[in-house]
Amino acid sequence: MDPEQFIRGFRESSPYIHRFRGQTFVISLEDESLSDGTLSSIASDVALLRSLGIGIILVFGAFSRIKYLLEKNRLHVETTPSGQVTTENILGVIREAVGSVRFEIESALSSGGDNSSMSGAQLKVVSGNYVIARPMGVINGVDHYFTGKPRHIRADFIKSHIASGEVVLISPLGVSLSGELFFLDSRDVAQAVAEEIRAQKLLFLLNEEGIPERKGQSTRELTSKEAKALLLRETLSPNQKDHLGRAIDTVSAGVDRVHLVNRLQDGALLLELFTRDGCGTLISADPFESIMQATLEDIPGILEIIRPLEASGILKGRNRETIETDISLFSVTRRDRNIIGCGALYPFFDQKMGELACLAVHPDYRRCGRAGNLLSWFEKKARENGLESIFVLSTQTGHWFSERGFSPCRLEDIPPSRRASYNHQRKSLILKKNL
């Protein structure tokens, strides 16, 4: 591996490592990973997450194993739009399937995954009756017998295991208050657990991409409002629509974020959690990326962006003290708590003008319209403050501003106080835009 690439990647991941310590994630996994060989790498990544101080609850399904055993025993399962009809005979097969899947997952987790740096990590794995179930009942005249829904989650028991450093493994079986066993949809269980314990994240590991991109538009992150609009897209598979709907419901119930991740991609969990742009689709109630008023806490991020541009002469040099003094005039583009863009608007109320300064975007996020979004943000702020025009001083980006409605003007056209501090050695081009 290229050392510079490693260092850059590690530095990028460090804020997430710090932030996630002490948080709890719920991971929903179907049992196809047992047959296609991906379970080992997933177990290794789970072990790594646990070693970083992240509480892990793994909710597993067993549809593939159940299907195999039903076919082996020549048993047919009736299904309805509400779910499958689980008779007593079918329930016996399901218990066998779930038990065998649980054993294999426990084995993989306990060893930390095979052929990996986490092999032999010896995770403490615990499973038990954490889900109180209720019968699905009779729907449209069809009795679903032992098919159920989560009724209550024993959150206190789960939290105590998490506090003890154990990985909690939860099956798709639940017991009713009267002692009857019911078969549950593991995705329903994962949702209920995440909502009840107020997990920071729910991650669905899918057999396909989360939500594919369309017409160049990224669907790496969506607000719940945007996700609802996407549900109408005909090109989404039934599985994608189902998980997108579940994500909307989960964030609406108070879980911070839901991730749809392709489990077939090696290291998908780590890429999704510890890189800025992830590899799946993130759904949250609030925007993943937004422009907002800067605070003192944003100064390190602002400096990181503008220092290289100051060194190359594109931006005028500013020390930390100057930015601290002027922080109320700065706005930033924040992406998952990382600063990827900044700018400042200095008002001259007597002349009803404003100077746009320090407009910059992180190199990884240029050529995606973010500088234009910042410009629009500052133009709106200027209008709200009663300003009639804005101007910029630029040595190398004059063409970009010209394309966005700015025109060259004279030094005499800007406010006297700014004219007095003009640096004649830089010979900056002055451009102005009427609002």
Image (tube, rainbow, N blue to C red):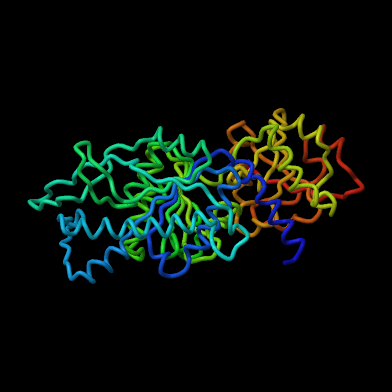
- What residue sits 50% from the left and 54% below the top? 110
Front residue (pair 335, 205): 205
Considering depth in this image, is 23 or 35 the residue closer to the camera?
A: 35
Quarter of the figure that contains the N terminus: bottom right
Side of 4 where 84 appears, left or right: left
Q: Is residue 415 left or right of residue 22?
A: right
Picture layout, residue 328 above or below residue 220: above
Point out residue 247 in the picture as x, y percentages from the top left corner. 39, 49
Rendered image quadrant of residue 344: top right
Quadrant where the C terminus is found in the figure: top right
Residue at position x 66%, y 35% in the image? 294
| Residue 118 x/y as whole percent | 60, 57
In depth, the one of 258 and 227 nearer the eye is: 258
Residue 314 vs 36, above or below: the answer is: above
**Image point (58%, 33%), residue name:** 384
- Give how far across and how far down residue 98 sits, in percent: 32, 56
Q: Residue at x 67, y 47 (%)?
A: 14
**Quadrant of res 86:** bottom left
**Rendered view: 392 above or below 104:** above
Q: State the image coordinates of residue 389 (x, y, percent, origin top left).
A: 67, 40
